[in-house]
Image (cartoon, rainbow, N blue to C red):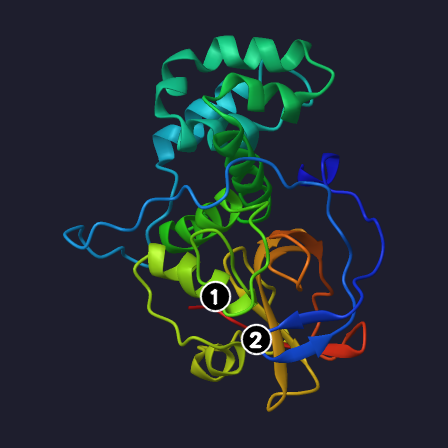
Amino acid sequence: MLGLLVTAAGFLVGAICTGAVILGGTVAALSLGNPGTVPAPDPRAAPIAPGTSVLSPDSRSAAEAAAASCPGLDWTLLAAGVLVDPPLASGLASASTILCRATDRPGTLMRLLPGPSEGQVALVLSHALDVDQELGVVAATAITFAATNLGAPYRWGGTGPGGFDCSGLTLQAYKAAGVALPRVAQDQFDTGPGVPPGAPWQPGDLIFFGSGPGGVSHVGLYIGGGDMIDAPYTGAFVRIDATPTAPGTAFGADVVVGATRP
């Protein structure tokens, strides 16, 4: 799904994140919207239950039924659209018809939503739902924060608004979901909990890179399908990058160290 918008454009050079240098990764084309617009979580809000699915059975059934009227229309586009713009639920049949006639369905979905930030979040959530149809609320909230900040500049030591480094982005993404993480990538990796060896990664997992378990230098937020959102290096922006999905795989001059599931 997101592959319709994400294109490989080359290798990163001199990538810097929380005090370490990395090389590698591919450049993604999706960097839209208004960075830094996600409100801080309300401290009065009830804690988020980690096992709660972001989609109710009724919402998923309605999206699937509406999409079924159009051959090849992915129900996750409609479901993600409703997640970021609940009023769309009352017009799913009309939205399905509009998307069915469109040659650029992701672009058309973006035009159906209130603004570019909402559109890019919907596309990223659609991508994640395509991988994990039971996407949990905690993961979806973290992904939504990161997706809303696509296009924000990399800033050494940045935790937003207005700029992030790699671990600053993941820190704030999970803070929005009610989960406290340490500040730097190495400590985030050490905190875990780790994804068991051989287990598939899920959207919302944190992916770590470096020379090894004691030399973590970079972290990204996995959104499924071999893609992550990260803040890569000075002069770049928060963006979607392709990532290897097996520990030990080369990532430029470093390797994939592993993944955690906060």
Picture quadrant where residue 15 is located = bottom right
Q: Is residue 256 visible?
A: no
In the image, is residue 134 above or below residue 236? above
Picture quadrant where residue 180 is located = bottom left
| Quadrant of the snapshot with the C terminus | bottom left
User: Measured from the top left, where is residue 253 in percent x and y?
Assistant: 80, 78
Image side of residue 198 versus residue 49, left or right:
right
Q: Which mark is residue 18?
A: 2
Tag 1 residue: 168
> Which SS class for mark 1?
helix
Mark 2 surroundings: few (<14), some (14-19) or many (≥20) residues within 10 A: many
Say whether marks 1 and 2 touch (CB < 8 Å): yes
User: Measured from the top left, where is residue 50 in percent x and y?
Assistant: 33, 59
Image side of residue 208 versus residue 146, left or right:
right
Extreme residue in the bottom direction:
214
240, 66: nearer the viewer: 240
In the image, is residue 232 above or below residue 68? below
User: Measured from the top left, where is residue 41 in percent x and y?
Assistant: 27, 51
CA gap, disc 1 to disc 2?
9 Å
160, 124: nearer the viewer: 160
| Quadrant of the snapshot with the N terminus | top right
User: Measured from the top left, where is residue 74 in percent x and y?
Assistant: 61, 28
Q: Is residue 57 visible?
A: yes
